[in-house]
Amino acid sequence: MGVHRFFYNEIDEIHSKGPALNLKYSIEQGILPKSELHIWHIELPDQVQNIKQQTQLLDRVEKLRLNKFSHPFMRQNYLLIRITLRNILGEYLKSPPAQVNINTNPYNKPQLCPLKGQANLQFNISHCANSAVIAFALDASVGVDLELCNKKRNIKALLSRYFSPQTTEEIDALPQAERHEAFLRVWTKFEAYKKAVGTGLRGGDQAIYIPQLPPSVDQFQLLFPDDTPRNHWLVSEVNSEPGTLISVVVDKRLKPRAIKHFSVKIPA
């Protein structure tokens, strides 16, 4: 597929000393190389002290959305993920986190609105429970999905609503004990693709055929066959914690040669 298959996995454990607002990162070369995809794994605490003091980094739109969360845990996670996102973007762009300009597309996908002279850095976020992941790429659309393996799902309903009959037939043909994992691998690739396209689950094409690709951790392969209009999307499963599954989809025009991992633990 024209992509040089050189891959590596480098984990940088980055722990903060103090509240999430003071997280500091050391990122080589400032901006990520165009041939790399950066994956940031974020461990969220159950509870954070003085959480209200952290809202100063958010812009007006982010604060409005924050106030719409009625559940304290969801509200806290949204705030911590946004603060972490702004700190990371600030380091990449060499800009104060509060001055990073983030807006949304018509489908509410967050995106960077770079100022004059700033890099076209694209990102995507996914989170479940106390885990979150943010994928970053330069000059290329990217989508990521994180799922808990033990979460109960109505597989038949989801297959019927979002996937082609061929996808359903391939999963139904598997032994019962293998169907849940097979579906989860298909689902994470599907949702990451929809997020990379920018529509999310609610927009764009429906009844998509996602093939049963062989597992490939931190190695890209074509998501769709060469002879289809969507053949410019690459997918990779991502090295993740036990009990979770992560897939990332990126435009192959990025020509990704490596996935580089970072880990952040936000203190309570």
Image (tube, rainbow, N blue to C red):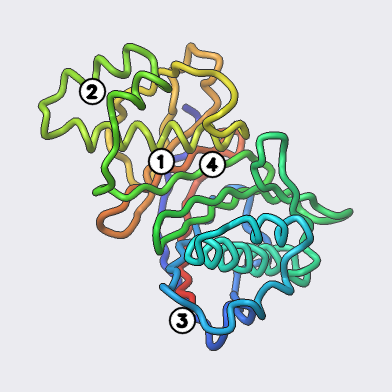
- Which amino acid type corresponds to the residue marked 3 in the rendered image? Ala
- List the residue tagged with mark 2: 171
Q: Earlier in the sequence, mark 4 or mark 1?
A: 4
Q: Is residue 92 left or right of residue 20?
A: right
How far apart marks 4 and 3 lie (CA) works out to 29 Å
Q: Quadrant of residue 91?
A: bottom right
- List the residue tagged with mark 4: 143
Q: Residue at x 51, y 21 (%)?
A: 231
Q: Is residue 229 left or right of residue 163?
A: right
- List the residue tagged with mark 3: 268
Q: Is residue 56 above or below residue 5?
A: below
Residue situated furthest front in the rendering: 70
- Which amino acid type corresponds to the residue marked 2 in the rendered image? Ile
Q: Earlier in the sequence, mark 1 or mark 2?
A: 2
Q: Are the two marked residues, 3 and 2, in contact with CB atoms closer than 8 angstroms?
A: no
| Image coords of residue 78 (percent x, y) | 57, 61
Tag count in the figure? 4
Q: Which label lies toward us, 1 or 3?
A: 3
Classed neighbour count for the residue bearing mark 4: other residues with Cα under 10 Å, few (<14), some (14–19), many (≥20): many
| Image coords of residue 20 (percent x, y) | 58, 77
